[in-house]
């Protein structure tokens, strides 16, 4: 494995794993239903701009 490949693998591992660590920490302080609601409420706001921009560019 090249140095670049190893770096990208480690970077991907960190990016993939950090949300699970943060969820584990948040569940200790926030109720699970609120956490589910918050994640579900944020998702459309994060996804809508990219879907709208691709719809506009498609014509």
Image (tube, helix red, strand yellow):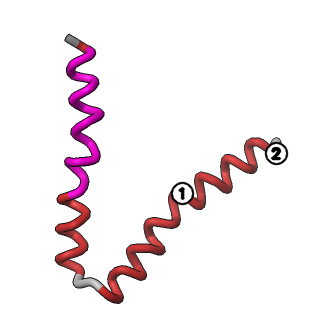
Relative vertical location of residue 44 with respect to residue 42 in this rendering, above or below: above
Q: Which residue is mark 2?
A: 3
**Is-magenta flag for residue 49?**
yes
Q: Which residues are magenta?
A: 42-57
Residue most extreme to the bottom:
28
Query: Tag on residue 35?
Result: none
Place residue 28 in its image quadrant.
bottom left
Residue ID at (29%, 33%): 50
Task: Report whether 21 appears left or right of 46.
Answer: right
Of pointers 1 and 2, the one earlier in the residue sequence:
2
**Circle 2 sits in a helix, a strand or a loop, which is it?**
helix
**Is-magenta flag for residue 9?**
no
Q: Which residue is mark 1?
A: 15
Residue ID at (27%, 23%): 54
Residue most extreme to the top:
59
**Circle 1 sits in a helix, a strand or a loop, which is it?**
helix
Relative vertical location of residue 12 with respect to residue 22 in this rendering, above or below: above
Q: Does the magenta stretch mainly form a helix, a strand or a loop? A: helix
Task: Give the spatial CA distance, label 1 vs label 2.
Answer: 18 Å
Residue 7 screen position, x and y as percent: 73, 49
Task: Report whether 5 appears left or right of 13.
Answer: right
């Amino acid at each position: 494995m090249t140095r670049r490949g190893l770096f990208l693998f480690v970077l991907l591992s960190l990016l993939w794993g950090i949300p699970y660590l943060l969820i584990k920490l948040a569940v200790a302080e926030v109720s699970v239903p609120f956490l589910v609601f918050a994640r579900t409420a944020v998702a459309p706001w994060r996804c809508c701009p990219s879907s709208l921009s691709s719809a506009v560019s498609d014509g």
